[in-house]
Image (spheres, rainbow, N blue to C red):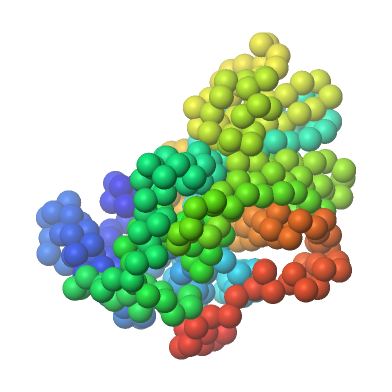
Amino acid sequence: FGNVIKNQNVQIIAMCDPFKNRREARAQQVDKHYGTTGCAAVADFRELLARKDLDCVEIATPDHWHVPLAIHAVRNGKDVYVEKPLGTAINWARILREEVTQRKAIFQFGTWQRSQRHFRKACEMVRNGMIGKVQRVEAWAPGMNTHDKGGIDDPKSELSKLHVEGLIPQTPPDGFDFDLWLGPAPAAFYSPARVTPDGAYHISDYALGFIAGWGIHSIDIAQWGLGTDNTVPVSYKGTCKWPTTRGIFDTLSAWDVTCTYDTGIDLHLMDWKTAQPAIAAYRPDCNHGTTFFGEKGWISVDRGSVYVSNKEWHWDKIQWSDKDTQLLASEQNNQWHGFIDSVRTRKPTVNPIDSAFNGDLICHLARLAAISGREIAWDAKSEKLIGNGDLAMHLDRTARAPWDKLIEG
């Protein structure tokens, strides 16, 4: 919201949310900012997307609504900024990719690290051979036992308390359309834990968990640095852990998955707790990051800085020549501003639909390998599992009626 309202090339004309108090409060903020009284507070997104004076939308809902809303928006002629991760079902994401491509809509994925200068420079260093031929990559992110609200297995933590209390059915508060919030997800009883950000991240009806919700950031940088936006690893194997206490959260609490590209490069995905011993051996500890290892050394990047094995590699002083790979720099080093620039110019964004789809697909396949305990083989051209056909159901979702029609068209 802050990035949108500060952009002088756009004007917010409506806020849409099933929580009445939230949409009205945001609409009032908008009117105060512009000195007007014209910002609409809308409950039903269909009313919003039918407006002819609306050019683009930002979709920042719980994960299970990302793709259905984006599909409907694109079909209504809107450009879309879609928060990460992309979604809960690969088949839904395929439909979105097809709609965006056919309609030539502008699509920006919410993996904003690509718009940060130091992430771009780190990936350029890798792409331009500073570490030599890449041998492997490590990517890690917080799991449920390295959560901001305390570990899921600590009964005294806020997250664990929310986990247990979420099993108690309650009555939805006045002014909240819970059925609309559920949308394509299965029917369920209301509890506050379901509709908080933490609940929406850690309940499998609404999300894949932090392996996607947080992990996609580190995976996205791995893909960008390797130059593999148009493909994914072809082999996946690993393990995972689940919450040990009984409660409402049922996504992975930890994971350790090795994903292998057809080039032989391994992408090692871990939650932070699993990754700590490895990363502490070569760089300052951080709950997220991506490290590229090559013949000549390594380069590692997180939201704080770039770390290198060779002190002579100064990321902030590098000047590339025209012959070097120079990745797309976002307007004002800001993902949202880059999106608006693309809406105006019709040029591709820093993270368009293909890279978003493939980054998200890695999350799905890594999770599938972890929960099944099997080695997963993937045909990157046909986008199908090789064998393990019984596991395909875990890559798909059946949308609840009538929202299935919204997706199918």
Q: Is any part of residue 133 visible from this angle? A: yes
Taking the spot 37% from the left edge, 51% from the top edge, the residue there is: 161
The x, y position of residue 24, in whole percent, is 18, 65
State the residue lying farthest toward the top.
311
Taking the spot 77% from the left edge, 67% from the top edge, the residue there is: 383
Taking the spot 77% from the left edge, 25% from the top edge, the residue there is: 131
Residue 33 lies, with reference to residue 386, above or below; the image says: above
Residue 262 lies, with reference to residue 298, above or below; the image says: below
**Left or right of residue 389, residue 269 in this image:** left
Residue 50 lies, with reference to residue 142, above or below; the image says: below
Q: Which is more toward the observer, 398 or 274?
A: 274
What is the tally of numbered marks visible in this picture?
0
Residue 332 lies, with reference to residue 310, above or below; the image says: below
**Left or right of residue 230, residue 143 in this image:** left
Q: Which is more toward the observer, 55 or 242?
A: 242
Q: Which is more toward the observer, 201 or 239?
A: 239
Q: Quadrant of residue 280?
A: top right
Taking the spot 32% from the left edge, 56% from the top edge, the residue there is: 10
Q: Is any part of residue 84 visible from this angle? A: no
**Left or right of residue 263, residue 218 in this image:** left
Q: Which is more toward the observer, 205 or 167?
A: 167
Which quadrant, please, contains the C terminus?
bottom right
The x, y position of residue 257, in whole percent, is 72, 46
The x, y position of residue 120, in whole percent, is 59, 35
Q: Quadrant of residue 364?
A: bottom right
The x, y position of residue 153, in whole percent, is 49, 45
